[in-house]
Amino acid sequence: MKIAIKTIEGVVLHQGEASSFKEFVVANKGSLAEASLHMADLQGVDLARANLIYANLTRADISYANLAGANLTGANLGGANLSGASLAGANLFRTNLYGACLVGANLSGADLREADLGGIVGLPAHVKQIKGSRHIVTMLSDDNVSIGCRRDTLAWWLENYRKIGEKEGYNSKQIAEYGDYLNALNASNAL
């Protein structure tokens, strides 16, 4: 079948013949920067080390896919299904993950600095560290959460992160970023 992958603006990135769309995407995984894969069925595909910089993957089904080491800088994964996916070591810097499903996903070693983590469903419990734009957030338990050199309970951080951020010279965007990280960790504990 004839297949084309386009950018959001409609410019053709790749076109050719393949037996399936999934097969074609995998064959071109090294150069999918800015690709429009909105609502694509990519369930179970191997996109390890794929170049998906600024790609549009909104509402795509990427469940059980291998995205280990993939570069998703600035990609839009809003509402995507990433359940059971491996994102180990993936670059998710400034990636939109708003409303994504991450139930059972492996995010070990992923770079989540400045990522939009709002509304995430099922942030994996094994996520213990989040690399923020200023400091790493480390969660060993509800009673042991560190940001930079300061350690306290998750409940304390949720109540005081704005005040501490201001005191430490964080700008409003950074304070909101760390609030999102803490809220995502709190939401994952409720599941």
Image (spheres, rainbow, N blue to C red):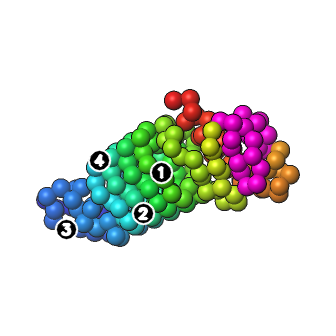
- Residue 160 part of the magenta segment: yes
User: Does the magenta run of residues contain 2?
Assistant: no
What whole-number distance in Å separates the C-alpha atoms at marks 4 and 2?
17 Å
Q: Nearer the viewer, mark 3 or mark 4?
A: 4
Q: Pointer 1: what residue? A: 107
* Residue 173 sits above or below residue 79 on the image: below
* Residue at 49%, 37% in the rendered image: 121
Q: Nearer the viewer, residue 76 or 148?
A: 148
Q: Nearer the viewer, mark 3 or mark 2?
A: 2
Mark 4 touches mark 2? (CB < 8 Å): no
Q: What range of the chain is rendered magenta?
A: 142-162
- The mark found on residue 69 in the picture is 2
Q: Quadrant of residue 61?
A: top left
Question: Helix, strand, or loop for circle 1?
Answer: loop
* Outermost residue, right side: 167
Q: Which dot marks residue 43?
A: 4
Mark 4 and mark 1: span between their CA atoms? 17 Å
Q: Amino acid at mark 2?
A: Gly
Residue 136 image point, x, y percent: 66, 55
Q: Earlier in the sequence, mark 3 or mark 4?
A: 3
